[in-house]
Image (cartoon, rainbow, N blue to C red):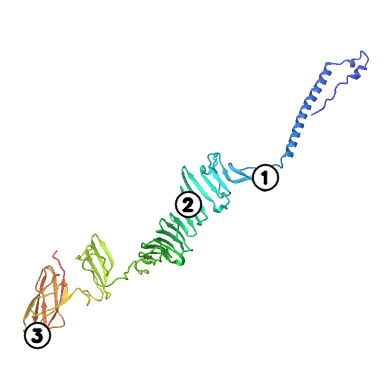
Amino acid sequence: MSNYSQITAFTPKDLLPSGNPAKVIKGSDFDGEFNAISVAIATKAEASTVSTLVTTVSDLSTTVSGQVTGPASVTDNKLVRFDGTTGKLVQEGGAYLFDDGSMSTTGSLSGGEVFLGVSNTSSNPSSSSALYLSSGSLPPLKSSLSMEKNTETVTLKNDTASGTIKFQIAGTTAALVTANGWGIGITPSVWDASSRHIQFDSGSFGVAVNRSPEILNNVYEGSSGVYTYTNNAAATRYRLQTGAHYWSSAPSGTAGATATLTDQMVLTNGNLGVGDPSPKARLNVSNTAITGGGPVTTGSAADPNCVTRFTGGGVIMDFGVYTSGNTWVQSRLGSDYTFNFPMIINPNGGQLGVGIGGLGYAAGIGAGGTVTQATSKATTVTLNKPSGRVTTAADALAAGASVSFGVVNSVVSTTDTVLVTVVGNDKYTVQSPYTSAGAFSVRLTNITGGSLSEAVQIQFNIIKGSVT
């Protein structure tokens, strides 16, 4: 910007005498003056504009409280927030606002009401929002959370009256959370304070994690570890404790009454105990309620003397215990105990070893019986056992003489072998000359030189055989 300065002094030229060449005003003098005036006019206009602009900026600076500055670079789509309390410095926040209007944040939302995904300007934006958080005058921890998809609304609501948090679908409570645990379709029972549990439906099923994880049916664990019936049905429990698995049960009871659970099966250290809480073998079966005795011979009901049963098709193999402590095994038809089946050991071959006690029937619990002849040593007797003892009559038997008598026996068949021996007497020999279906014969011989009149005890054993 510059002021106009005159180049040619015109007034002094008037004082020069006529004819003086300097008195002549040339065209170049006029051009110079006009150019100087033009430059001055132009620079004066720019100065006026700049002056006006400076005045405007000056006025603006007096209106704004302070300048706002930000970082040199930011992350695309991140929301802006103030840094500090001056109001002059901004920085990028933790939330994102994308071009399509969606938002995301790793932090928490709090406040009176928050609407996300609002699609219109309805007076009740919660009805059109994808996520609606509301607390009103309540603190954020007592907020309700509603999520809507089309016409289906899912609500998480705090019920201050009952002290529960409810999960509602279309207004119907689907789950509750109380100080006593979770209830799915039911208000949970008052469990032990140390447990963390979930209770389902009518209360007949629950899962608890306290001292040990548990799955329970028709029962829950109340205070001090006391189990209580939820209804009148029988109760069951599965418990995992210190690496061992326990299956327990209680009989039918009364809702609200104490339930006494008894361990029925235990799996620990690879050993399975059925009826035995401390199994010592891979399979340990115990029946403490057993009465003791031989296998039941009729019907098909549970055998009170049976400890273990294996079933193949309709045939069963039972293992039981006598009152004396001896054990038995019986193969029979499961639907009718009058039908018994042979038991084959090592059908493909191989020796059968027997301990020191020997092979045979133990005294007092064997499969044999006894019978005494009524009239003479020739009198037929009946004894339907696979082994037994016949006591003969005491009539006389001459020196070197023999006598025969028949034994009616339903066990013996034509393919069997009958072994006979005299018990405690070396004055006789005995043999079984023949067998038939349902009977065999016994021949007794006096091998002394004199007549003998005494009762002789003869032991027999039937060995089952086959011709094929």
The quadrant of the image that shows the N terminus is top right
Label 1: element kind: loop
Q: Is residue 42 above or below residue 59?
A: above
Q: Nearer the viewer, residue 405 or 142?
A: 142
Looking at the image, is mark 2 or mark 1 earlier in the sequence?
Answer: 1
Q: Identity of the amino acid at label 3? A: Ser
Q: Identity of the amino acid at label 2? A: Phe
Task: Give left or right: position of 332 versus 157.
Answer: left
Extreme-top residue of the structure: 19
Task: Give left or right: position of 24 versus 383.
Answer: right
Q: CA distance from mark 2 to mark 1?
A: 44 Å
Instruction: Read off the residue under disc 2.
Output: 167
Residue depicted at x 23% and y 60%: 314
Report the label total: 3
| Comparing labels 2 and 1, the label whose residue is closer to the camera | 2
The quadrant of the image that shows the C terminus is bottom left
| Comparing labels 3 and 2, the label whose residue is closer to the camera | 2
Measured from the top left, where is residue 400 in percent x and y? Answer: 6, 82
Instruction: Read off the residue under disc 3.
Output: 453
- Graded by Cα atoms within 10 Å as few (under 14), some (14 to 19) or many (20 or more), the crowding at tag 3 reads few
